[in-house]
Image (cartoon, helix red, strand yellow):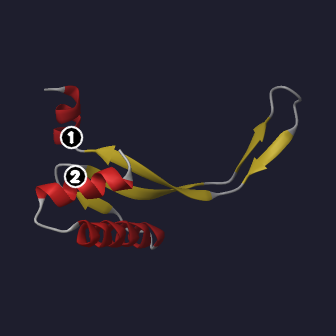
Amino acid sequence: MTNKDIIQSVSQKSALTKQATERLLRSTVQIITETLNDGGDIKLQHFGSLEVRSHQARSIVNPRNGQKTEIPAKDVWTFKANTRLKEAVNGN
């Protein structure tokens, strides 16, 4: 499903125009992005949660040539689906 599909679907299910729905979707994505960038968590009831986790820097060895490589520390986002979402997807 693309942004266009989501906008059309939400517009049909709500009383919003496509333009208003697009602004709402863009604002929502912007707020989520800003919150995660600031180190916050997002919890959406009946859907799931998004959070940022820090991964420490580490050294690895390439098994093909034995060369050591440093992987820098970085922050990654994770998503954990809510039980209701899992059940809905699995048809329970």
Q: Describe residue 52's horizontal placement relative to residue 70 as left or right.
A: left
In front of the other: 66 or 76: 76
In front of the other: 57 or 32: 32
Residue 20, by quadrant, is bottom left
Q: Earlier in the sequence, mark 1 or mark 2?
A: 2
What residue is disc 2 on?
Answer: 9
Residue 40, by quadrant, is bottom left
Q: Secondary structure at mark 1?
A: helix
Q: Residue at x 23, y 57 (%)?
A: 44
56 above or below 26?
Answer: above
Quadrant of the snapshot with the N terminus: top left
Q: Describe residue 81's horizontal placement relative to residue 78 as left or right.
A: left
Indicate which label's residue lies in the foreground, 1 or 2: 2
Q: Residue at x 26, y 50 (%)?
A: 48
What residue is disc 1 on?
Answer: 85
Asked if the residue at tag 2 contacts the one at tag 1, i.e. Cβ–Cβ closer than 8 Å, the answer is no
Quadrant of the snapshot with the C terminus: top left
- Between the residue at mark 1 and the residue at mark 2, the CA separation in whole angstroms equals 19 Å
